[in-house]
Amino acid sequence: MRKVALIAAGTLLAVACNKQVTTAHPENEGRDTQTFADLSKAKVKHLSLDIETDFNQKMIIGSAQYTFENNHADEIIFDTEKLTIDSVVLAHGKKTKYTLGEQDSIKGQPLHIEVSKNDTLVTIYYKTSPEAHALQWLDPAQTNDKKAPFLLTQGQAILTRSYIPIQDTPSIRITYDAKVKVPQGLMALMSAINPKEKSADGVYTFQMRQPIAPYLVALAVGDVEYQPIDHRTGVYAEPGMLKAAAWEFAEMGNMVTAAEQLYGPYPWEQFDVLVLPPSFPFGGMENPRLTFATPTAIVGDRSMTNLIAHELAHSWSGNLVTNSTWDDFWVNEGFTVYFERRIMEALEGKDYADMISVIGFQDLETSMRNIPEKYTSLKVDMTGANPDDAFSDVPYDKGYLFLKMLEDRYGREKFDQFLNRYFSSHAFQTMTTEKFIDYMKANLTNGEDDFVQEWIYTTGWPKDLKKPTSKLFDLAEAQFHQAIENGRANQPAKKVEISTKSTNEWVHFIRLIDPKKHTINDLKYFDEVYDFTHSNNPEIQTAWYEKAFLMKYDVVNPHAKAFLVKVGRRKFLEPLYLALKESNQMALAHDIYKAARPNYHFVARNTIDGMLNYKGN
Ligand code: BES
Ligand code: ZN
C-alpha cells in the first residue's frame, strides 16, 4: 500500500512542477546494481588475507581465503578489477575451475568459481595490477618526511575489488584477519586491531572481529609512528608531523565521549586517526578503528577538527548501520553530517556548528547547480552508473537539512532518543532508505510521512526549507564590505594577521567575492591587507585561488600551481580546475594538471580527467 501511494504522489508532483521529478523508486529497495555477486547462491562471512606488498612492482601479491554461506550453489561469484588470478583452491587443497567474465567499465570483472553444494571454504591466489584503482603507491618525495615510500588503499565506494577479490557490496558484512608482509622499517596498519610499533621483520597480523562492509577493509603502509591521546584514541603519522597532528587532534578523546553522550557507546573500542600524505583524495575516510585523514586538516588552530568529528560519527552512521546500496548513500552521509554538527556543537558551541552548516549549505547550492538533476534527490538510482559520478554534496547537506527538519518538527529531545534507538536496534545491520522510513514512521512521526516524497524521492529543492545562518558570518560580511569600501577609497592598507579569525570565517569572507561585482584591484587590496596569496591554510588557499582564477588575478598562479601539485584532495582540486575551465584558461589548467596528475589518486584523476577532457598520461 505504502509503495503505491508514494508512486502516485510522485507522478502528481512531477506534473505540477516541471523542475522537480522523481528519479528513484521504493521498488529498488536493497538492489545493488554495482556488484556481480549473487548473494542468494553464496555469501561470504569471513576473509583471511595473506599478502605481501611489493613496492618495486607496485603490486600486492598473495591470497584471500573465504568462509562462506552456501545455499546449495554450484558457483560463488566475486567482484574483481584488474586482478590476475593465479589459482583457486577449495578445502583440503582441492583445485577448482574458475572463469573471469567480461570486463564492465564500471564494475570490473566477475570471478565465477565452481563449488559444490557442501563447500564453505575457498582460497584465491592473486596479484593486483600496478594501476589498481584502490591503491596509491607513493614515492618518498610524495610524503611529508621524504624518506620512505607509502601505500594507501581507498575502498569506498567500489574499489576494494581492485586489491582483493571480494563480494564488493555494502549489503553484506564480513569479519577478517590478515597477515601482511611489508618492507622492513615500514609499519602496516589496517581497519582492525593495530600495532603501535614497527615489527622487526616487516610482518604484521591483524584481526577485525566485528562484521564490516567490504568497502571498509583498508590498509596503509609507511614510515609512521603512534602517539596516544587517551586510553582509546591516538594518532599515527610520519615522524616529522606526528607532534603537530597530535596537537591539532588533541580533542579526539573528548569527541568520542561527546558522541557517546549523544547516541550511545562507541562500538569499536579504539578510535585512531592515520594522517596520510597530502595526495590522499579525501578529507577523511571512516575506516573502522582507524580513520584515514588528510594532512590538510592540520591548519595549526584546531579549526578544521569537524573532519575528525565527521569520521568519528561514521562509527555509528555508516560503519554500524550501513547503507544497503550506493543508492542509499545519504543514509550514511546525511546522518553523519547531522551527527558531526551535534558533536561540534557539544564541544565548540553553537556558533561553530552554525558556521559549518552555512558552509555546507553553500556547497549544496553549488552541487545543486552543477550536477545532473537526477542526482539531486536523496535516494538515487545509479543503475549502470559509477557511484563516483553521483558523488556530490546532496547526500551530505540535503541529508543534513532533512534530519534537521525532523529535529525541528518533533523536538530535539524526542529526535535524540529516536536516533539513539535507531543506532542500537540496527547495530551491525544494513539499512535501506525504505527501512529507515518505516522505522521513522513507527518510532518518531507517529505515521506521518507527508514530507517523505518531497524530501527523499524528489529532485531539486524542497519547498519549506530553513536556511542555516551564522552570527559570526554576519560579522565577517560586514567586515568584508568595509574592506571593499576602504580599498576603493584608497585607504592605506593596514596589514591584518590571518589569525584574527578562524578558518571558516576567512573562507566565508573570501566566498563573498563576486567576480561580477568586484575587481582585480579589490583582490590586490585584500592581498595587501590579508596576504591570502601566501596563506598556508588549504581551505583559505582553495577559496582564494578559486576567485583569483575566475578573475584572472594571475599573481596567484605560481602559488596555486605549487598547491595543486602538492595536494590531491579532490574537494580542493575540483573547484580550482573548474574555475580555470570556466575562465577559459584551459592551457593553464592542462599545464598545471600535467605536472600534478602523477601525484593524484585514481578517484581524483578520474574526476579531473573528465572535467578537463584530459587524454594524456
Ligand atoms: N566516506 C566519506 C568519503 C567517501 C565518500 C569516499 C564516498 C569515497 C566515496 C567521508 O566520510 C567523507 O565524507 N569525507 C569528507 C569529510 C567532510 C564531510 C568533513 C571529505 O573527504 O571531505
Ligand atoms: Zn562521510
Image: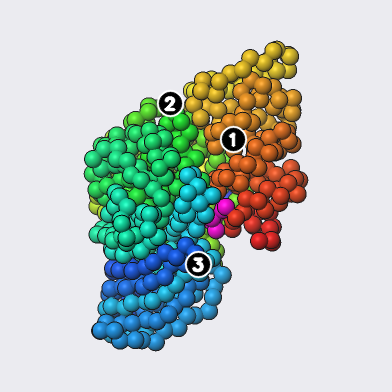
Residue 541 is marked as: 1
Q: Nearer the viewer, residue 352 or 585?
A: 585
Residue 351 is marked as: 2
Which quarter of the picture shows residue 62?
Answer: bottom left
The reply to whether callout 3 and callout 2 are in contact (CB within 8 Å) is no
Residue 57 is marked as: 3
- Range of magenta residues: 599-604
Q: Tell me what residue is drawn at x 47 percent, y 67 percent.
A: 59
Magenta segment main secondary structure: helix
Q: Residues within 10 Å of mark 3 (few under 14, many from 20)?
A: few
Taking the image as shown, residue 574 lies to the left or right of residue 320, namely right
Task: Identify whether 94 is placed above or below 157.
Answer: below
Q: Tell me what residue is drawn at x 66 percent, y 25 percent.
A: 527
Q: How is the image coloured?
A: rainbow
Amino acid under disc 2: Asp
Q: Nearer the viewer, mark 3 or mark 1?
A: 3
Distance from Cα at disc 3 to Cα at disc 1: 36 Å
Distance from Cα at disc 1 to Cα at disc 2: 23 Å
Q: Tell me what residue is drawn at x 40 percent, y 81 percent.
A: 87
Q: Tell me what residue is drawn at x 60 percent, y 51 percent.
A: 371
Q: Position of residue 347 (x, y in %)?
A: 34, 30
Q: Position of residue 404 (x, y in %)?
A: 41, 38
Question: In terms of sequence position, does the residue under pointer 1 or pointer 2 come before the other?
Answer: 2
Q: Give the structural element (helix, strand or loop) at label 3.
A: loop
Amino acid under disc 3: Gln
Q: Is residue 418 magenta?
A: no
Q: Nearer the viewer, mark 1 or mark 2?
A: 1
Quarter in which the N terminus is drawn: bottom left
**Residue 563 visible:** yes
